[in-house]
Image (cartoon, grey):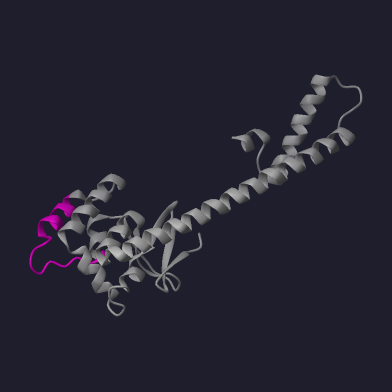
Amino acid sequence: MAKNKIITIENKDIVIYSQKNEDYISLTDMARFKNAETTGLVISHWLSTRYTVEFMGLWEQVNNQLFNVTEFSNIKNESGSNGFVLSAKQWIEKTKAIGIISKPGRYGSGTFAHKDIAFEFGSWISPHFKYYLIKEFQRLKDDENDRLKLEWNFQRMLAKVNYHIHTDAIKENLIPAALSKQQISFVYANEADLLNVALFGKTAQQWRT
């Protein structure tokens, strides 16, 4: 399971949870900027607006094949009326939504939303908050990309160094003296791939790909 990530805005931590290579941002943490004592009501208030219902319905229809369009239509027709209240739990259960998830647990529990939806929630909190939310989220992704590039370059250099060690070892210990150049090339390739798989879990061709 991927470790939760955290961004900080005005000395308050906001947890980011990754699921199936998608980032979900804690609406519960974000709601504290509106009211630290009643985060559930803050989220429910936002969900109950007609604009939010329409946006979330559009997002789900684009990204969720199992989205219950019939239930969405019923909710949409009721939204905006006096007394209409929609909680995250009701939205998930009625429409089979995936853009909002309820995550239990001691670390990073609460209501999370896909980043596309979370940014909309940020707009509702305030333009000031949304601006810093996007900036901090982008900084986090840039840091991740830089770290991945560094790891990839290190692995590439390590593979290159080890390849020369492998080929020297093959030449000195595994190749009989009475082979043609073509036969020697075959032995090199075959033995080097065995070593690559043993050390890195990939053949040379898979590594290049």
Query: Does the magenta portion include 57?
Result: no
Q: Which residue is most to the bottom? A: 37
Q: Is residue 71 above or below residue 160?
A: below
- Give the residue drawn at x 72%, y 46%: 158
Compared across the picture, whether 191 is left or right of 98 comes to right
- Give the residue drawn at x 49%, y 54%: 142
- On the image, which quarter does residue 93 sit in? bottom left
Q: Which residue is most to the left? A: 82
Query: Does the magenta portion include 87?
Result: yes
- Give the residue drawn at x 23%, y 67%: 87
Q: Which residues are magenta?
A: 70-89
Q: Quadrant of the C terminus?
A: top right
**Any part of residue 89 in sight:** no
Compared across the picture, whether 190 is left or right of 154 comes to right
State the residue in front, 94 or 111.
111
- On the image, which quarter does residue 182 sit in? top right
Compared across the picture, whether 24 is left or right of 144 comes to left
Residue 36 position, x and y percent, is 31, 78
State the residue in front, 70 or 31.
31
Residue 62 position, x and y percent, is 28, 45
State the residue in front, 29 or 176.
29
Compared across the picture, whether 41 is left or right of 152 comes to left
Residue 98 position, x and y percent, is 32, 55
**Any part of residue 142 in sight:** yes
- Give the residue drawn at x 10%, y 69%: 83
Residue 33 position, x and y percent, is 32, 73
Q: Is residue 140 above or below residue 175?
A: below
State the residue in front, 206 or 105.
206
Q: Which residue is most to the right? A: 177
